[in-house]
Amino acid sequence: MSEKFCPSCHKELKLREAGYPMGSALLKADRVHVDIYECPECHGIRLYAAESDMVTCPKCGSLHSKKEKCAICAMNEAIDEASK
Ligand SMILES: [Zn+2]
Ligand SMILES: [Zn+2]
């Protein structure tokens, strides 16, 4: 994983949150995970597509953060429950 630098202060950005699920309330099946970095100098927040903590679901093959359950499988389970 390469280091990130603030484009204005050229300070090394600090990782605040890895694999943060963006838009999870709206886009259940198609989440975007980002790593949130903060500049210690200007406290600017920068977002990068998450490079870490991503795992491939063994059931459905979708990528998701290993910090949370697979959204696709959770949805499929909910549909299965509803159709019983
Ligand atoms: Zn900065
Ligand atoms: Zn899955």
Image (cartoon, rainbow, N blue to C red):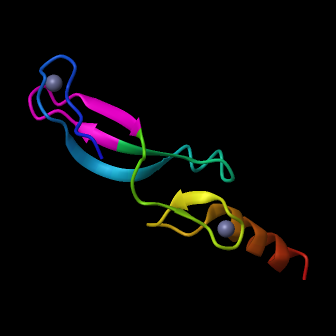
Q: Residue at x 70, y 73 (%)?
A: 59
Q: Quadrant of residue 64?
A: bottom right
Q: Residue furthest bottom?
A: 84
Q: Nearer the viewer, residue 35 or 27?
A: 35
Give the farthest residue toward the top. Answer: 8
Q: Residue at x 20, y 25 (%)?
A: 6
Decide whether residue 73 is among the magenta residues: no
Q: Left or right: 17 with respect to 21?
A: left
Q: Quadrant of the C terminus?
A: bottom right
> Which residue appears at 11% of the width and 35% of the height?
40
Is 7 located above or below residue 66 in the figure?
above
Number of labelled discs?
0
- Taking 40 as reference, is 80 above or below it? below
Question: In the visual, does 47 lie left or right of 38?
Answer: right
Residue 32 on image: x %, y %: 54, 44
Quadrant hosting ligand 2: bottom right
Q: Is residue 3 above or below residue 52?
A: above
Residue span colored magenta: 36-48
Residue depicted at 75% across the width and 75% down the height: 77
Judged from this view, the residue extending furthest toward the front is 2
44 vs 66, left or right, is left
Residue 49: x and y, percent?
44, 40
Q: Position of residue 38 (x, y in %)?
A: 22, 37
Furthest residue to the right?
Answer: 83
Q: Answer with the quarter of the image where residue 56 lies.
A: bottom right
Query: In the shown orientation, is residue 38 left or right of residue 57?
Result: left
Q: Position of residue 47 (x, y in %)?
A: 37, 35
